[in-house]
Image (tube, rainbow, N blue to C red):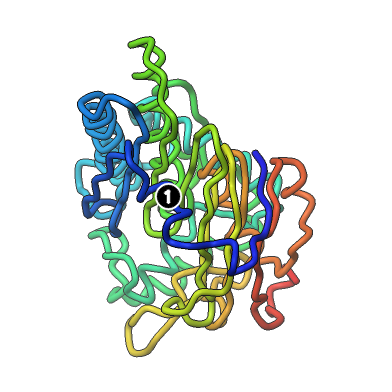
Amino acid sequence: MSIRCLRESDVTDTAIPLRDAGIVRRAKPLLGTLVDIAVGAADSEFALTAIGASFAEIRDVHRLMSFHEPASDVSRINRAAAGEPVEVDPRTAEVLRLATELQNASDGAFDCTVAPVLVLHRLLPRMNSWNEARPQFHERHAELFSSRVRRIPAFTIDACSVVKQRECLVDLGGIAKGYAVDRAVDAVTSLAAASRYTIDSVLVNAGGDLRYHGRNAVPIRLRDPRNPAQLSGAVAISDGALASSSTSGLYGRTHEVSPLIDPVGRIPLPLGAGVTIAAPCCAIADALTKVALITGNATHPLFARYGASVVQFLAPPLLSSGHR
């Protein structure tokens, strides 16, 4: 992966490869956003077939890992009792292993079990067993995030099975979109390799979480974390990924709140912060945006460990949890 900042004068519409001849491009609403896939190939029929395979992978990730879908692996894990084995797709197991690895390595800054806080603020739908209308919900919610409970590993995971070691609610929204982007790119490159067909480029962009594979670097415009309608600069990226997260609010129970949660303080992050991270793969970039925002640390040791770097950063105010 390589990435470099560009001057605005270096970026023109005609410089963006997605507009070049030989690029086949399609977009569909998936993952709660508009997913744009562009494949550069001499044979447009092959490019369309490859794009179809990419969208199929993204649909699979949504089907398996959506908090909202009752039949998803995530929903079945959430309904299971602690100690009960749940058979899952190998892709779900792979994401849970990575999420657990990142949680341990970040000292809990990345945590895929913060869903009860999102349920509390009505940013995720409640489940029957997690009804916030019950008098004991707040006590149960506090207990789940106590330091004593959080020291217990959430899962044991093998190739196709997950067992919860403690009561928890899983939400893979902080990493699954990036993983879906990676799977979509890999679908194109794998199909090309199996067909012994050379492609020039593939770019998958899921609402700002993107990965690019190609012979030449591609310029990517960056949005201002404080005002996503405005552009804040541009970078050129080659064989790598970018992911952005911000604490721009969603309308929760009674007021605007951030969808990003401080796992230690059990509270939404302050509004008005944002970050863009470059990494070799989009799942890592996606997850590390949460580590950056929750710790407020643009030079967190995890970035170097995973070959990632901060491209732009607007830090949140000091948190009360001790992460900053």
- Split into 4 quadrants, where in the image is the C terminus? bottom right
Q: Residue at x 61, y 72 (%)?
A: 265
Which corner quadrant of the image does residue 150 belong to? Answer: bottom right
The residue that mark 1 highlights is: 172
Which amino acid is tagged 1? Answer: Leu
- At horizontal 67% and vertical 59% (from top left) the residue drawn is 5
Relative to 72, 227 lies left or right: right
Instruction: Decide if residue 291 is on the left or right side of residue 216.
Output: right
Residue 223 in the image: state x and y as whole percent: 50, 71
Mark 1 secondary-structure assignment = loop
Residue 272 vertical placement versus 168 (above, below): below
Residue at the bottom extreme, as displayed: 255
Asked which quadrant contains residue 179, the reply is top left
| Up/down of 172 relative to 260, above or below | above
Residue 73 shows in the view:
no
Q: Nearer the viewer, residue 126 or 308?
A: 308
- Name above or below for residue 300 compared with residue 254: above
| Residue 169 on image: x %, y % | 41, 53
Q: Is residue 276 left or right of residue 164?
A: right
Q: Residue at x 64, y 59 (%)?
A: 291
Q: Quadrant of residue 120?
A: bottom left
Q: Position of residue 17 (x, y in %)?
A: 43, 47
